[in-house]
Image (cartoon, grey):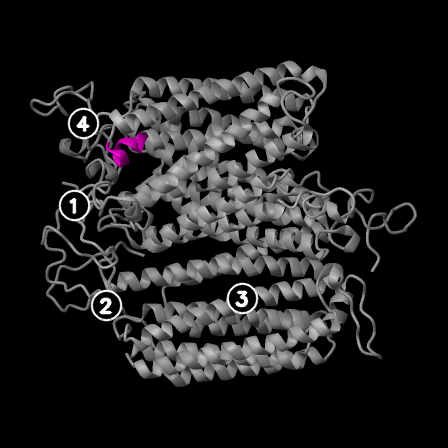
């Protein structure tokens, strides 16, 4: 009485090839994938959140040091990076839109631009890092500033600010790198025609990840550059 | 419908009626499996190995403490013993044991699903676990850590090569190991929440979810939200050690207590990862072996969620004497009292379930009852520690050690073994010898209490924890404790022998040896690869004994009240 | 989140098909323009010294931008509310972590000046073992 054999549950319903064996319907598969990605994003919020807590605690202790050290960062490059990432987010959103409509070429193009923006972001970050290395503004015990003349010298414990700077932006850059990898793979799959109006789960879920990476930078920028 | 189904995601054809053990044999089919039951079995093997290794270190530790001064090893080695015992037991056994092994095997079956939401992610979780364990083994080969499983700064961040005191560089691979193991935990959590939300069979509403599933849901919340902070903690620790970033070093403007905040923000919710699934198992066991629905089902389910959420608010009670501000200590103490309430809700509901239930004291039930008794002791002693004035005297003494062993061993390990006994017939298809099971339980129960009850006395009389040597007045209690550890070890040996024997020559298990109404007993033992021969639709709850049919309940179960049921014609009694 | 009720229906029924809202492309572009404008605003406010207000504005504007991305790019505004609850819960616990930690780190030595303070109460000198920037 408790279990009814649903003898014909698969008859009359043609299972598409991309529907995994353990799902009943494409909607179930899509919604499950979305839920999984949101849960992963929750984990990432805690991951970067913990770093922001460390930042917050430290900034409360040494507000002046943070201010002075932060002025060594280039606001223009930071703002440029922000706009680059925001634009890449737009491109990712449009890629999802195109995939929802089954437009393969448009999806591929938007994905490609997203990846390109991500690469630009990393390039700008590289320039910034190189600048810090040249000036000796490195984390912790490697903090040996050789600032140009006329610039006020930094407090002795500024190595901690730069430690947080490199750790936070470095982990973020790592996530950007992973994002490039994921988006490239999605682009390849799209090229092979894996997606359609009925099946764009992977594009949607990859875009969710990418948007989250953007959100982290939205908070990193004012926290580190605009003190 | 065809007899053989080719399903996308499975590269080979799968016979929907063959058991998951028989379908596709060979080592590679196991190493690349997507079947949650096989992944669960692999996890089970791994955590049992970890438990054995951790237990070995514990026995060596206790052997050293048999006499004052040097018994077997020098002080530095002793420090490594307790640190490794802690790290292995916490991160390689307690955190993954119930969710990743029993949870993986049982959850989809209890939900009427074919598999978890993300089978490939499940396999990846397992391999990440193995990868992390390899880092840990590497660290052990290179001397092991002696910082305690908590890796407190500044000891863990000081390199003796830079002059002065410091811990060995084995700290780095060990913390990396824990970091990697954390990712395994997170991915399991993601998988389980998605599975419980999305993969329930038709008719399985939230109110018909088994209490074990509810507990896995709560545990998954904690796994997802807490573990990333541990990853950051160990990243900061590693950077502090390599780069001297100064975040935990007062000489550079940092604060070692900040490390403790970061560490315990994960590690306190982690202890709820350890205990909540054990409670879920106990709920299911009590219901089956009282042969009635749990009293206050929703209260028990919601208390799991409450524990998960409240557990995030109390981490500071590990830092009471570390130098926190008084405002913080007061807040944390008050919240610690609050977090005891959901546990109390569960204990009362279990007892109410037992009252006027049709109780049978078979081996799984012995473990469940032990859990209730021992966890209550452990939980109440935790409240002593939550009181600020009392904690000043008891912190870092054997009282703390006794408290957490009562909840972790008297709680989680009892729950784990109870579940293992209960579901053993289901996933191995074999019965074990009940007499050996009772003997094993008896030695474990007695040995555990002999080992740890005296440690409450040791602690309240001032014996500090993690000490290699001690004053003469503590010697007799330490000796009792050590002898207890041998009895405990004997108990586990008996159980190990019993389970191994069962695998080789145990009687074939019937579909429902315990007469339970829960859903996993509706499918054969062991289950087919896709869990049910036909997609199930559930029309009753898992604890509805009045509504369940005789056919569902009496397949292999000898009910002493109704001896005519359950014995098929010509069949021998189980 | 109801249990799955798969339909036994004729072939070709679309009941289980994926359905997600797709906003017009111009809408997404408009969101981007808003985000860019907010970025300009936040850079602008950082050039003036407004004391505590600077940090509040910075966090506030960043949160507005994040909400735009979350709501529209990530579809939270049109999707199942549960995903929004997940995000809120995660942020809530980051808040818990921050609040309770700073409740400690900022309030050392306030009740009992002999404990954990950075200044020795008797002399007013900085406590030993600390750090002088």
Residue A159 lies in quadrant: bottom right
The x and y percentages for residue B147 are 65, 39
- Tell which of B75 and B535 is nearer to you: B75
- The C terminus of chain A, quarter of image: bottom right
Residue segment shown in magenta: B422-429
If the image is split into quadrants, where does the N terminus of chain A sit?
top left
Q: Check residue B428 for magenta coloring.
A: yes
Does residue B458 sit above or below A95 in this rendering? above
Please give left or right for residue A175 compared with residue B216 in the image. Answer: right
Q: Secondary structure at mark 4?
A: loop
Q: Which residue is mark 3?
A: A174
In the figure, B142 relative to B4: above or below? above
Q: x%, y% of residue B557?
A: 20, 25
- The quadrant holding residue B68 is top right
- What chain does mark 1 sit on? B
Marks 3 and 4: which is nearer the front?
A: 3
Q: What's the CA distance linking mark 3 and mark 4?
A: 56 Å
Q: Residue A62 colored magenta?
A: no
Label 2: which residue? Answer: C17
Does residue A180 lie above or below B421 as drawn? below
> Which residue is located at x 47 percent, y 22 percent?
B489
Q: Which mark is residue B533?
A: 1
Give the mark toward the camera: 1 or 3: 3
Residue B167's mark?
Answer: none
């Amino acid at each position: 009485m408790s279990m009814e054999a649903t003898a014909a549950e698969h008859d009359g319903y043609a299972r598409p090839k991309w529907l995994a064996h353990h799902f009943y319907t494409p909607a179930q598969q899509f919604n499950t994938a979305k839920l999984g990605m949101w849960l992963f994003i929750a984990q990432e919020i805690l991951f970067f959140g913990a770093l922001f807590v460390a930042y917050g605690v430290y900034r409360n202790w040494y507000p002046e040091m943070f201010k002075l050290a932060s002025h060594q960062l280039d606001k223009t490059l930071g703002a440029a990076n922000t706009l680059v990432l925001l634009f890449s987010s737009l491109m990712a959103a449009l890629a999802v839109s195109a995939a929802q409509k089954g437009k393969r070429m448009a999806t591929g193009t938007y994905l490609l631009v997203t990846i390109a923006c991500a690469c630009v972001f990393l390039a700008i970050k590289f320039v910034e890092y190189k600048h810090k290395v040249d000036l000796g503004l490195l984390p912790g015990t490697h903090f040996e500033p050789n600032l140009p003349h006329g610039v006020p010298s930094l407090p002795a414990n500024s190595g901690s600010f730069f430690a947080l700077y490199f750790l936070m932006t470095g982990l973020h850059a790592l996530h950007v790198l992973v994002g490039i990898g994921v988006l490239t793979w999605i682009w390849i799959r799209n090229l092979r025609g894996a997606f359609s109006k009925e099946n764009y789960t992977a594009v949607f879920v990859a875009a969710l990840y990418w948007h989250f990476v953007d959100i982290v930078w939205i908070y990193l920028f004012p926290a580190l550059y605009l003190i | 419908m065809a007899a053989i189904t080719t399903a996308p995601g499975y590269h080979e054809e799968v016979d929907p009626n063959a058991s998951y053990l028989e379908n596709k044999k060979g080592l590679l089919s196991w190493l690349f499996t997507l079947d949650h039951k096989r992944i669960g079995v692999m996890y089970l093997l791994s955590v049992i190995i970890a438990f054995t290794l951790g237990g070995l270190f514990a026995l060596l530790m206790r052997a050293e403490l048999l006499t004052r001064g040097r018994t077997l090893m020098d002080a530095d080695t002793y420090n490594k013993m307790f640190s490794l015992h802690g790290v292995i037991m916490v991160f390689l056994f307690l955190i993954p044991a119930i969710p990743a092994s029993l949870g993986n095997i049982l959850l989809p079956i209890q939900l009427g699903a074919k598999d978890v939401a993300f089978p490939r992610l499940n396999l990846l979780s397992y391999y990440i676990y193995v990868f992390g364990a390899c880092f840990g083994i590497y660290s052990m080969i290179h001397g092991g850590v002696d910082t305690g499983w908590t890796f407190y700064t500044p000891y863990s961040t000081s390199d003796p090569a830079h002059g002065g005191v410091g811990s060995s560089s084995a700290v780095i691979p060990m913390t990396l190991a824990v970091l990697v193991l954390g990712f395994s935990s997170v991915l399991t959590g993601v998988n389980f929440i998605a599975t419980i939300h999305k993969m329930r069979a038709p008719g399985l509403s939230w109110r018909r979810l088994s209490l074990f599933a509810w507990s896995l849901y709560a545990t998954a919340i904690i796994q997802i939200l807490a573990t990333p902070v541990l990853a950051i903690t160990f990243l900061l620790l590693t950077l502090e050690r390599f780069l001297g970033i100064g975040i935990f070093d007062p000489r550079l403007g940092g604060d070692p207590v900040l490390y403790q905040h970061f560490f315990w923000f994960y590690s306190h919710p982690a202890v709820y990862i350890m205990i909540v699934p054990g409670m879920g198992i106990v709920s299911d066991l009590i219901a089956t072996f009282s042969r009635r629905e749990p009293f206050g089902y929703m209260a028990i389910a919601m208390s799991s969620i409450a524990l998960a959420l409240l557990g995030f608010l109390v981490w500071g009670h590990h830092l009471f004497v570390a130098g926190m501000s008084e405002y913080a200590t007061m807040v944390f103490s008050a919240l610690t009292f609050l977090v005891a309430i959901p546990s109390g809700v569960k204990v009362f509901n279990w007892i109410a379930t037992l009252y006027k239930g049709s109780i049978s004291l078979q081996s799984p039930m012995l473990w469940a009852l032990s859990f209730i008794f021992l966890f209550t002791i452990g939980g109440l002693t935790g409240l002593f520690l939550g009181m600020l004035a009392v904690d000043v005297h008891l912190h870092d003494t054997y009282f703390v050690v006794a408290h957490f062993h009562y909840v972790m061993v008297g709680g989680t390990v009892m729950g784990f073994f109870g579940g293992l006994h209960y579901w053993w017939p289901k996933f191995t298809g074999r019965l074990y010898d009940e007499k050996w099971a009772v003997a094993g339980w008896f030695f474990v129960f007695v040995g555990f209490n002999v080992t740890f009850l005296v440690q409450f006395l040791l602690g309240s009389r001032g014996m500090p924890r993690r000490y290699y040597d001690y004053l003469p007045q503590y010697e007799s209690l330490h000796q009792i404790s050590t002898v207890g550890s041998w009895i405990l070890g004997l108990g586990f040996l008996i159980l190990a022998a019993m389970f191994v024997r069962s695998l080789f020559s145990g009687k074939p298990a019937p579909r429902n040896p315990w007469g339970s109404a829960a859903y996993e007993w509706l499918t054969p033992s062991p289950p087919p690869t896709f869990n049910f021969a036909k997609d199930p639709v559930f029309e009753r709850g898992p604890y509805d004994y009045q509504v369940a049919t005789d056919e569902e309940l009496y397949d292999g179960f000898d009910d002493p009240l109704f001896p005519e049921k359950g014995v098929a014609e010509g069949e021998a009694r189980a | 989140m109801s249990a799955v009720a798969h339909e036994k229906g004729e072939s070709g029924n679309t009941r289980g098909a994926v359905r997600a809202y797709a906003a017009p492309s111009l809408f997404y572009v408009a969101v981007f323009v808003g985000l860019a404008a907010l970025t300009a605003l936040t850079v602008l406010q950082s050039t003036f010294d407004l004391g505590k207000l600077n940090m509040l504005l910075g966090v506030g504007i960043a949160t507005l931008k994040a909400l735009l991305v979350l709501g529209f790019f990530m579809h939270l505004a049109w999707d199942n509310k549960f995903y929004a609850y997940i995000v809120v819960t995660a942020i809530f616990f980051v808040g818990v972590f921050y609040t309770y930690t700073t409740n400690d780190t900022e309030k050392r030595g306030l009740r009992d000046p002999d404990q954990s303070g950075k200044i020795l109460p008797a002399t007013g000198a900085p406590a030993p073992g600390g750090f002088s920037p």
